[in-house]
Image (tube, grey):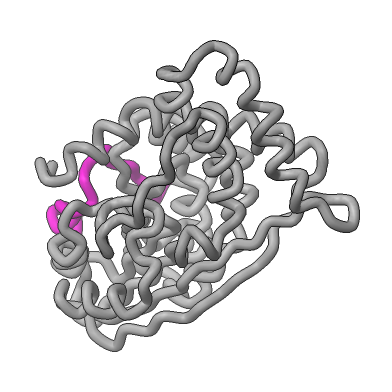
Amino acid sequence: MSLDNAEQIAYWSGSGGAAWAASAARMDRELDRLGVLAMDALAPAAGSAVLDVGCGAGMTTMQLARRVGRFGRVVGVDVSGPLLSIARQRAAEPGMASVDFVEADAQDAGIWGPFDAVFSRFGVMFFADPAAGFAGLRQAASPGGRLGFVCWQSRADNPWFSVATGAIEALAGTRPQPPPDPGAPGPFAFADADLVRRVLRAGGWRDVRVQPEADELALDDATLDERVAFAIRQAGAVLAEAPATVRAQAPARVREALEAFRRDGAVRLRRAVWVVTARA
């Protein structure tokens, strides 16, 4: 396990992983379409071996297993014990005998290869050294193997993510963080498409393609409640240091910020991603 990624590993093994685990079903529903875009672009063949990077609660790993069939093999790797616990429970269903899960840093994935394809749904933006991370994934790929993943464009292009976070920052009096250095670990590490191309080429990948995609997620009243609850859990560290009055106001303030995007009977939030493919 790479020590360079120790901070991210600690987060996803602890509070971050726990927050996502508590909302795993909802997050899978909301992210499914975006993951399928990358899966379709990757187009894993029947009988092939696939690595699922940052597999989380395992939904994408199981989708890949259905695509490669019973003669294929899929390995899901993640650093989050809480999410992998859910993944292993889900994969106990019939027809998932070809699925394995490994709790480890995907940067070290070469030891489980070779793989015909490497896939990720929002799991590759957290390497402390992105070029080294993708070099590790390149080592895991067979000659000519394919890479396909989806990652976020900028925070400004993703109200789905930023509206609730911004409301909590404003309420808690937390100054908005300056934009991180390009490529720094985090959800928006690959907001710059040119950076994605450079990082992949530095990691040994070729034929890199970066395709923009965007959609709008509509939240009804029930899913809006879930979105508010998730935002509060995710902001646990910020709110823990805030006065009790701030913590008490946080759910209402997040809901108010989201309601500003209500249109035609639902809260509608834009999402923008890159769908990326490459070849080893």
Q: Quadrant of residue 205?
A: bottom left
Of all residues, the one furthest to the left in this rendering is: 3
Q: Is residue 64 within the magenta segment?
A: no
Magenta part of the chain: 97-113
Quarter holding the N terminus is top left
Vertical comparison of 14 with 67: above or below? above
- Residue 73 visible in rendering: no
Vertical comparison of 115 with 104: above or below? below
| Horizontal relation, residue 23 to residue 179: left or right | right
Where is residue 40 shown, x and y percent of the image? 52, 73
| Horizontal relation, residue 114 to residue 99: left or right | left
| Horizontal relation, residue 268 to residue 199: left or right | right
Where is residue 213 shown, x and y percent of the image? 56, 74
Quarter holding the C terminus is bottom left
Camera-nearest residue between 99 and 207: 207
Q: Is residue 99 within the magenta segment?
A: yes
Where is residue 249 shown, x and y percent of the image? 65, 22
Camera-nearest residue between 7 and 24: 7
The residue sitting at 43% across, 45% down in the picture is 176
| Horizontal relation, residue 146 to residue 110: left or right | right
